[in-house]
Image (tube, grey):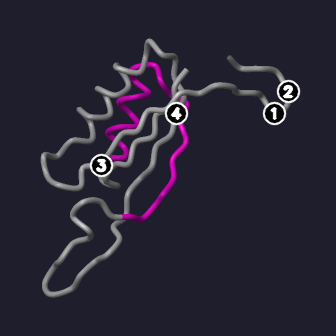
Amino acid sequence: MKLIRAFIRPEKEEDVVFGLEAAGFPALTKFHVFGRGKQKGLDIGGIHYDELPKILLALVVKDEDVEKVKEIIITKAQTGYPGDGKIFISPVEEAYTIRTGEAVL
């Protein structure tokens, strides 16, 4: 299994979440975060915004579903402008249900 973390624009949150749900991936966690990427913030009218709001989506999927989820996120979150976000994919070695203590994998 893999953990997929995607940092996306706040205005694309609904599109991505509904796209994942429609494709059969309803379980995820959302975080409202602030940060900056390569652009190191944003200058608007003489004001510098050092950190910008983003949404962090986190979901665990089967190895065979990684490409599908990645493509949904890219397709739904992409605007073509700097700051569209990043996707990070990491292996999940173990997972347990807290209530029962059972292994999930």
Image: 35 above or below 89: below
Circle 2: element type: loop
Task: Give the structural element (helix, strand or loop) at label 3.
Answer: strand
**Pointers 1 and 2 in contact (C-beta within 8 Å):** yes
User: What mark, if any, has residue 101 been given in the picture?
Assistant: 2
Q: Which mark is residue 7?
A: none
Q: Which comes before the other along the chain, label 3 or label 1?
A: 3
* Residue at which label 4 appears: 59
- Residue at the spot 27% in from the left edge and 41% down from the top edge: 77
Q: If the image is split into quadrants, where does the N terminus sit?
A: top right
**Left or right placement of residue 11 versus residue 1 in this view:** left
Screen quadrant of the C terminus: top right
Residue drawn at 51 percent across, 23 percent down: 61
Query: Label 1 is placed on what type of residue?
Result: Ile
Region rendered in magenta: 12-35
**Amino acid at dot 2:** Gly
* Residue at 32% from the left image edge and 34% from the top image edge: 73
Say whether disc 3 or disc 4 marks the residue closer to the N-terminus: 4
Q: Is residue 76 left or right of residue 88?
A: left
Q: Residues within 10 Å of mark 1 (few under 14, many from 20)?
A: few
Which labelled disc corresponds to residue 85? Answer: 3
Q: Position of residue 7 (x, y in %)?
A: 38, 48
Give the secondary structure at mark 4: strand
Q: Amino acid at mark 3?
A: Gly
**Residue type pointed to by label 4:** Leu
